[in-house]
Amino acid sequence: MTPDQAVALMADLLRTTAFVAAPMLLAALVSGIGVGILQTATQVNEASISFLVKVASVIAVVVVLGPRLASYVIDYTRADFEAIARVVR
């Protein structure tokens, strides 16, 4: 394996990680900001409300995008194992 191939594998790993984690992180961020603005406007400062809304939004994203994200991870894993097979030869 050449250094260029190793760098390409690492770049693909980081790209896959970002692609899979980004929707859930963005959902938590947007819902947290929304709840924060709502709590500021109503002067209700309860941490459990924000937590529950974030958890619900992340679960909704996983339910909606879960199969697509899982297939992306499976495709990456298959390509990674094929790359390992090429290195061993």
Image (cartoon, rainbow, N blue to C red):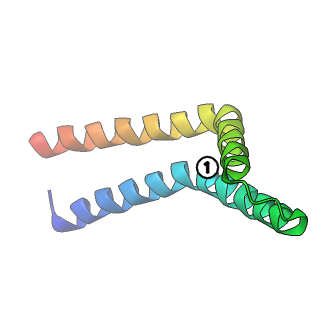
Q: Is residue 74 left or right of residue 69?
A: left
Q: Quadrant of residue 88?
A: top left
Q: Residues within 10 Å of mark 1 (few under 14, many from 20)?
A: some
Query: Helix or strand or loop: what does disc 1 sit on?
Result: helix
The front one of 68 and 47 is 47
Q: Is residue 8 left or right of residue 67?
A: left
The front one of 6 and 33 is 33
Q: Residue at x 53, y 51 (%)?
A: 21
The C terminus lies in quadrant: top left
The front one of 61 and 33 is 33
Direction left: furthest residue: 89
The N terminus lies in quadrant: bottom left
- Residue receiving disc 1: 24
**Residue 54 screen position, x and y as percent:** 68, 48
The front one of 39 and 1 is 39
Total number of numbered discs in the rendering = 1
Q: Amino acid at mark 1?
A: Met
Q: Residue at x 58, y 56 (%)?
A: 22
Q: Is residue 60 left or right of residue 69?
A: right
**Residue 34 screen position, x and y as percent:** 80, 61
Q: Is residue 38 left or right of residue 15?
A: right
Q: Quadrant of residue 84?
A: top left
Q: Is residue 64 above or below residue 27?
A: above
